[in-house]
Each structure stands twice: as C-alpha cells, then as structure tokens.
Image (tube, rainbow, N blue to C red):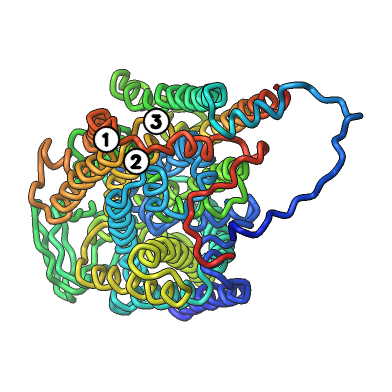
Amino acid sequence: MTRSFDIAAVVVVVVLTLGIGSYGLRLARTTTDFLVASRGVSPLWNASAISGEYLSAASFLGIAGLVLAYGADMLWYPVGFVAGYVVLLLFVAAPLRRSGAFTVPDFAEARLGSPLVRRLASLLVVGIGWLYLVPQLQGAGLTLRAVIDVPVWVGAVVVTVVVTVNVVGGGMRAATFVQAFQYWLKLTAITVPAVFLLLAWQGDGAPDLAGPAGPVFRVATTLHLNDPVTVVVPEQVAVTSDGRPEVLEPGPRRLEARTVVFPAGAAVPQVQGIERATGDRWARPLSGAGGREHPLYATYALVLGIFLGTLGLPHVLVRFYTNPDGAAARRTTLVVLLLLGTFYLLPALYGALGRLYAPELLLTGNTDAVVLTLPAAMIGGTFGALLQALLVAGAFAAFLSTSSGLLVSTAGVLVRDVLSGTVRDFRRATLVAAVVPLLLALLATGLSVGQVVGLAFAVAASTFCPLLVLGIWWRGLTGPGAAAGLIVGGGLSVTAVLATLTGVVDHGWPAVLLAQPAAWTVPTAFAVMIVGSLLTRRQVPAGVARTMLTMHAPEALGLTGRPFTRDRSSP
Amino acid sequence: MPDRPVRVTVTSPRTGAVRRPGGPQVLRAVDEQDVVGDLLLRSLVRAQLLLALRLSAAFVVVLGGLPLLFALAPASRDVQVLGLALPWLVLGVLVYPVLWSGGWLYVRLAERHERDFVDLVQRG
C-alpha cells in the first residue's frame, strides 16, 4: 500500500508539472518568451519560481542526510544557500537586470566586447549546469529505489523525460508557473510531516536527540542490503544474516548478506567514511564528528564557496532577467530570502530525528534517504505511508524544478552560442542539454548529492563570481584579464572537483583543500582577473562608461533604452 | 530606415509651468557622459558599492565570527538556550531573520541612493 501511495505521489507531481507547463505553452510565442518569459513576471510569482527552482535534491534530501552523518557543522549548508542570495542582492541583482543580458555569456560579451570571454563563459555555463544536473538525476534514482524498489536508472530517466517535454513545450514561461507551484509544494511537503514527526517524538517521551551514546538500534531492525557494504563494528553483536545466526566482532568488516537482523539496543556499525560519534560530539560544531578533518578550515571554505557560488549558478542568474526592472529584481530577492529562510528551518530537524529513529542509514551509507524514511519509522501505518508519499512528492518536485531550470539555462546558452537562435533550435538544444547529464548520471554512481552540489558551487564561485562582481563594479576589467581569471579559476576548481570525485587524495590537508577548494581558488581567480586587467589596461572597452550607465542608472531617468541583448526574434 | 524622416509631435512649450533651470542639461550631461555626467555616475556607483561592501563586512563579522567564537571559546558550543544548544539555535533559526533584515536594509538604502540621484539629475 505504501508503494501505491508513493507511485501515486510521483504521478500526481508529474501530471501537475506537465499540466501547468502546457498552460504556459499557449503563452509562449517568441524566443524571448521561451527564454525569459518576456520579463513580465511579478515579484511574488518570480520569487516563488526562483525559490522553487533553487530548492534542489541537495536542499530537500541532502542537508538532512549530511546533518545525520556529520552533525552541527552541516547547518552551514542551508545558511550558505540563503546567504548566497544576500551576496547576490548586494552585488549583482539590480545592475545585472538593468544590463538586460539574458545569460552570463551575453553579459560578458556586452561588457567586455570579447568573443573569447563569451565562449569561455558559455563553456562554464554548460559545465556547471551539467555538474549540477547529475546529482538531481541520481537523487531521483535513489528516491525511487528507496520507496518503490525499482532500479536506479528509472528515476533518472523519468525526471529527464518529464523535464525535457516540459521545457521543449513551454520554455521559461511554463517553467515560471511550474516552479512557483513547486516551491509551495515543497514547503508543504517538508512542513506537514515535520509537525507530525515532532508530535510522535513528544509522544515517545521526547528522548534526547544528542544523548551521550553513539547511534543504537532502538528496536530490532531488519536490513535489506542491495549491495555489499564495508562497515566498522563498534562492539561485539549477535545478528542474524540471511537466516543464520552470526557474531560480528569489533573492527572493519564486509557485510555480504542480503538480509541482516540486528537486536534492539545494539550499537550501529557505520559505513566506512562516516565515523561513529557520541551525541555530544555530533551536536557540537567543529568537533570533526563523522570523521571530518580540519573542520575549522572546511567550515570557512564551504561557507565561502556557497556564499559566492550562488550568484554564479546559471539557473539562478537567468531568473533575474524575468523581473521587469532593477528595483523589482531587488524586491524579488527580498521575497526569495523570506521563502528560502522559511524552508530551511526544517531539513536539519529531519537529520537530528534520523539519528535516533533511522540509524540504519549510517550503516548503509544511504543517509540522503533519511527524510523519506522517518514517517514509516516513527509513525507507520496508513498515515505514515501518506506522509511518506507527501515527502516523495516534495522530493520529486525538487528534482523536476531544479532540473528544468538548469535545462532552460544550459539550452539557452547552447541555442544562442552554438545554434542559430530560433524556437525550433531551442528545442533541439534542450535535447542535447538533457541527454548528456543523463548519461553521466547513469555512468557515475555512488556520489553523495550534497557533495557534488557543493563542488558545483565551488566552480561557480571561482569563475562567474569574480567575472560578475568585477564586471559590474570596476571599469578597469578587460577581456584578457577576465579570460585569464576564468581559465585559472575554472581550471583550479575543476581539477579539485575531479581529484575529489576520483578519490586520488583521500586524507590530510591535501584532501581537505581539494574537497573544499573555494577558500583558495576564489581569491586566486579574483587576483588573476585584477592583475591581468591592470597589465592590459589599454584594452579597457571603449564603451565602458555607457555600459556602467546602463547597469547603474535608475530606470526613472528613462536612459536605459540600450540593453545588452541580442534579441533577434522581436521586432 | 535612416532615409525616412522621423515623425515628431510639436506642442507648445509649457511656458506657464514652474521650471527649475539646469534640469534637462544635467540629464543630458549624464546621458551624453560629459565630464559632469560621468562624475555624477561615478559617485552613484561608488555610493552603491560602498553600501554593499559595508553590509558585507557586517555579515562577515557576524557570520564569519561564529566559527571563530566556537573555536576560541569552546564553552560556547555547549551553552543551552531555550532547550536548544546555542549553535543549533543560532545556525538553525536566528540566522535567517538576521539575513533577511540585512537584505531589507540594503534595499531601503540602495533605493534611497537612486532616488537622490534621480532628484539631483532631474532638478539640477
């Protein structure tokens, strides 16, 4: 029965998404409509859409999983996700909107007059877009496997198909309606179960969430293992493996049985890579709980990467072009801060409850599933199944909305820079933009959703953040300087990402520096851009004063009739 | 279509209206970016950038100071407030209204700068 609820939830979300999308289809006529909804979306709609698009698998599932595994330091993830919008508001929102550019490559070319920078920016948009799409598709695969037990590829394919159909059908106008709806769905889906989970926790005598012990099985627990897993057994425990009694001795051990039954009260053996921590240690910041090395550096680097990476995410930026003017772009961002702050109050709660009620996830390592697991573990029955279905709906809304935002922006760049700029080509570009990450998601498995998303932020922070901030505020930025900064910042951060994903370096300072690269790649990229521009001072674009006027002069003066865009389809 | 004459509407000047001298000239100065106009624009950009930098500095001190506080005064990690550990209360709840207030303050001040600029340019 649980299964049919969950399937129904997925179907309802998919049908609503496509239904609202086809409503938008009737309104989309020109390329401008497709890409930025003709810039006529009101602040509340637009803010809901921005938030809906932004709350991805990492927010809905990933944060809770990270908190469950690594404790208090992970609270910085949601803080960074919101604070990133404050940085965006302070340095980018209004001037970027006034520039009238659709995409970062448009901005780069109009501001610097350099086709090289434009091409580099296009490459980065597509790269970051794909890096961010992969964990969304994998999250979808893991979710469907966790709740209805289908192979991982099913979820990834479902999300890819729905999103592609939707974007090909209606473009951004459709996406605006769909994503506004999906924000409210996600907020409902995370809030309502949280209320009942808290009541259930109260009813259970409100046990200490950060008690002195390490994680234990509160009740006898039967585990179904899809794949063999290597765990560290903390203390001797008698279990039943595939029906036969077995004693697990302390130390590392590979579990190959399909079904393992642990008795109530047993200490939870944890997967290698997530060290066992006492409750006090888990609840305390900078304690390195879960086995994180050099937590103070890691915290600062993580926070910096997320703060500065948000304003470089392609699907976030393209949204700001749908505001009618610069002032509306600021107001929209304020509403976004409110909507996101409300949502982010809750994921950490799921992580904390999960340590008590779903500790088996620390054994399987599938901590991203904690949000989906709790209703069955704490409430159960038909009501628990309904709550779980609601969470599945929210998670699917997260995969669909973020993926369509990323797809619109990567396809937008492909159509403007690779193909020739008609509606038909936008559709073809969307197919290309969707198939590549699907293949990547099917080939590269076993990556944590939160981690990959963090790396996408680091690349964005090391490239688009300096390009936008210097481009908007400093007249001295030159094409060669910007190109050098993009190459160095992008090169360093992508190298760090690849080294981390392949696990070449796995301990000590080098591993920490590569896993959280923003603290050194962002300052390097800024420095290279500034020094490179100073060295090529004669190449400051001739029209820079006019560009600054366009970006900074209030609309009330009536001067901003010279936007950057190359809008070929409208008269 | 450069060779077709531009259509204009001719109306009588509003000689009866109150006019402050200088307005249109300053607007043109900004639009055509002569020395005065460029100077005015530079002052607006500088004011907006300084505002953004000041607010960021405040956020860096408040948010960036938290890990340092936890590192230098380990007792702060375990303080209990309203039944919650201090780090969880601050990072899980309080930080969001603080971020929103900072954003709200920024929008207010940035819009004031722009209004001042418009007044300056239009009224001379």
Q: Nearer the viewer, residue A527 or A162?
A: A527
- Dot 3: what SS? loop
Q: Numbered disc 3: what chain?
A: A
- Pointers 2 and 1 in contact (C-beta within 8 Å): yes
* Residue behind mark 3: A474
Question: Which residue appears at 16% of the width and 50% of the height?
Answer: A500
Q: Counting residues from the N terminus, which is met first, the one under dot 3 or under dot 2?
A: 2
- Residue lying farthest to the right in this orientation: B16
Residue at image mark 1: A529
Residue B7 appears left or right of A227: right
Mark 3 residue type: Trp
Looking at the picture, how far across and down is residue A382, in whole percent?
52, 73
Q: Which residue is mark 2?
A: A467
- Give the residue at x 59% y 30%: B30
The mark nearer the N terminus, 3 or 1, is 3
Cα gap from disc 3 to disc 1, whole angstroms: 11 Å
Mark 2 crowdedness (10 Å alpha carbons): few <14, some 14-19, many ≥20: many
The quadrant of the rendering that contains the C terminus of chain A is: bottom right
The amino acid type found where label 2 is placed reads Leu
Say which element carries label 2. Answer: helix
* Residue kind at label 1, given as amino acid type: Met
